[in-house]
Structures are given as structure tokens and as C-alpha cells.
Amino acid sequence: MRTTKLVLVVVMVTALAGRVVFLVSADSPKPGENLLQDPSFEEYWRWSTWEYSIVVRDPGKGHPVNGDLSFGTPYFGTSESKWDKERPRQDEGGAGEVSGDAYWKFRAGYYQTVDAPPGAHVRFSVWVNGFCEDEYLARCPVILKAGIDSTGGYDWQSKGVHWVAKEIADQKYTQLTIEATVGPGGYVTVFTWGEPTLPMLYTAAYFDEASLVIVPALTARSAVTVASPVAPAIASATATVSQVLPASVTQSNVYACRYPCHRPLPR
């Protein structure tokens, strides 16, 4: 769903981290007003992106890539209209898409930081969907998450990000919802997360109809979800990888990128 606001927006971009902060010069937001820019992801460049890319090689001739432990560099963009949450509709809309190369898993998502009144209770909601199939139309679940950092941080691995998650295998949209209290700095960051559970031929995660609204304090809760949680966010890429590596795989076989590597991943 598209929304239009007549507001003055000042955008600060930190090039190194790819962080986009929207400072909205307007009256104080009202309960129920969506604080996000481009909630439909149809202008996905208004969102910042994060990703986790790593290549884990098995021992043996040629040191083949371990597809179960490796994560490739994903594609970010607007999906085909068939993945629009509101489809069918007259205009050709889309959702925010994260997709991977054939037979590679990915772990990645979008995030956005906005200003909000300190101490306000906010609710982040987003519709999520996943696509994971092989050439025989066999499916695998896709892990979808929604997260929120009430301090305005932009590190998806931070312990300050609280997540709620759902695994989707039936290619049907589910809404994820989580609440928080805005910190004294007056900023809040919301995150999405997509991750196929297997390295299949076709893999993608979709996000649509996001909202971040102020809710009355009397009805606010610290965290609300309509989905069952799965594994928590990874606290440290390097430390976690060292824990899951087979005994025969050394750390020298591992290459990790916290931000995009801008290089093709080897087979």
C-alpha cells in the first residue's frame, strides 16, 4: 500500500555502513501514524540493507564449498508483482525482495532508522513471505524475522536488537509484530531478516506493508508476536562460525564479510 506525506525529510547517509536515517521535520507523530518511509518497499533504496556472507570449504580434493554452512551475497530489490501482499490490484506493485544464487543460502535483510519521541511505545509490524524450491518443486522453510532496536542502533548482530520470527514453507504471507519503548536518544531502528534453511535452486524472502506506529502506553507490551520464535540472532559472525565448523575444517578456510564483499563467491 502506498502512502504520501507532505513533510520535509532530511536524509543523512553514512557511506561506510550504508546507514540511512530519516529525520522528519513535522509536528509530533500521532498514535497510529506510520513513521516509516516506503512501507511497501516499492522504492527499496529508501531502506538500508545488511547481509552475512561467508564461504566454508570442506576438506578434500578441491576443497568444495559446504553449501549448508556457507552464505552467498544476495540480491536486493523490488519483487515481481505476483509477490505483492495486496495482489491483485490495478497498479503493478511489488514487495521488498532478498534472493540468492542457485544452490546458495543467504542471510540478509532491510533496516531503517527513524526519529521518535523518547519514552514512546512503538509497534513494528511487517508482512513476510518466503520462496525455497528445487527443480522438482520440493520446498524448504524460509526463516523470516522482524526486529527492533529501541536505541536506534544499526548493527543487526547487536544484543540490543529484539527479534520475533517465523518459518514459512507454504509461500503464504504472515504478519510479524514486535513492540518496544523508544530510548532517550529519540531514535528507533527496525529490521527484517530472510534466510532459507537449505541451499536450493530458487530462494527468496519477501517483505511488504511495514508499519512503525506509536501506541498508547496503557495498551503497549514489551514484545508482541503472531508467530513462533526460532533461533535467536547471531551475536558474532566469526565466533559462531568457529563453533559450527567441522573438526577437519580450519579457520583459514573461512572468509566472512559483515557488509557486502562486492566479489563473486567461488563454487
Image (spheres, rainbow, N blue to C red):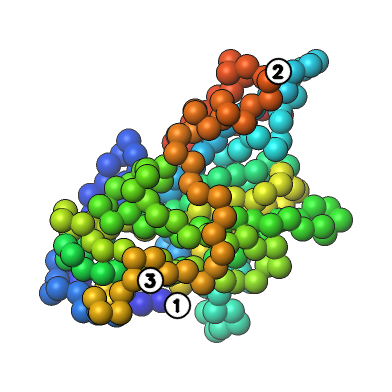
Measuring 55% from the left and 68% from the top, which residue is drawn there?
227
Q: Image height check: is 243 above or below 26? A: above
CA gap, disc 3 to disc 1?
11 Å
Q: Which residue is mark 2?
A: 248
CA gap, disc 1 to disc 2?
50 Å
Q: Which circle's residue, 2 or 3, is located before the other in the chain?
A: 3
Q: Which residue is mark 3?
A: 211
Q: Which quadrant of the structure image shows residue 82?
A: bottom right
Closer to us: 175 or 259: 175
Please indicate whether residue 119 sits to the left or right of residue 35 in the image. left
Tell me the mark number nearer the camera, choosing from 2 and 3: 2
Q: Amino acid at mark 1?
A: Met
Tell me the mark number nearer the camera, choosing from 3 and 1: 3
Tell me the mark number nearer the camera, choosing from 1 and 2: 2
Q: Secondary structure at mark 3?
A: strand
Q: Position of residue 41 (x, y in %)?
A: 45, 64
Q: Which residue is mark 1?
A: 1
